[in-house]
Image (tube, grey):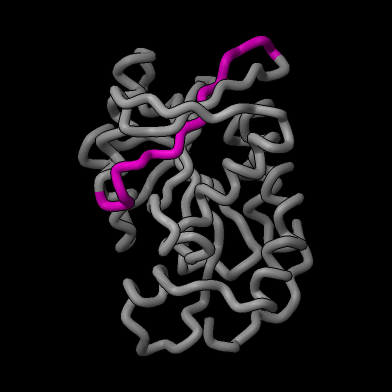
Amino acid sequence: MPLSLVAGLGNPGRQYQDTRHNLGWVLVDAFAREKGLTWAYHSRFEAELASWQAADGRTVYFAKPLTYMNESGRAVAALARYYRLAPEQVAIVYDEYTIDLGRVKVSASGSAGGHNGIASVLQHLGAGFVRYRLGIGPKTTPQMDLKDFVLGKFSASQHSLLSDSLPHFLKGLDLLLNSGIEAAMNQLNRKDTTTTPPYDTDKA
């Protein structure tokens, strides 16, 4: 089933800019810039929305929920209901601490894995949506609380690694939207799809 909605997860507010938890927003913002899309606020969805025409003529909506991470599913479900989309037509772009920084994985099932945004999407939308998981791991200090880690900011060298990885993330998202989940999984989930420099262990 072709994708028609892509939601990047994050938290609104200047204090959350450049935090690991906002990486979903970073990618959908970058995709919008690359494609020349314009964001507009829609109060009924509690989200910023942009639209894009895929190669096959299909309209794909991009969303940035403004509900804060823990209530992301409220905005996503409202959009899905309005556009009459099944969960399988929705992709969620978000940060994943169990994946190394600079890597991306695509999946269509699983638990929330401790991610409150995904837990909210599961609660409000249901299972079956596509997950575009952007690595932010490993935790810089193993004993660090997960909340403190995801709300921490990237160091300068981590920013550099992300900048180098961004074209790979964008190509992967384009592949997912134009060729489907199987093609994206086959290419992006292989560890040799990108050469990732050693992870910077400096504290953010």
Examine the structure image and report whether residue 58 is included in the region drawn in magenta. yes
Task: List x then y, in percent, for residue 1.
Answer: 50, 20
Residue at (69% x, 37% y) in the render = 33
| Highlighted magenta segment, given as a residue range | 56-70
Q: From the viewer's perspective, is residue 204 above or below residue 195? A: below
Q: In the drawing, does residue 167 fall left or right of residue 149?
A: right
Residue at (53% x, 63% y) in the render = 18
Q: How many marks?
A: 0
Q: Depth check: 204 or 76 in front?
A: 204
Q: From the viewer's perspective, is residue 204 above or below residue 104? A: below
Instruction: State which quadrant residue 191 falls in.
Output: bottom right
Task: List x then y, in percent, for residue 29.
Answer: 59, 42
Task: List x then y, in percent, for residue 96.
Answer: 47, 61
Residue at (44% x, 38% y) in the render = 64
Q: From the viewer's perspective, is residue 152 above or below residue 14? A: below
Task: List x then y, in percent, for residue 117.
Answer: 32, 51
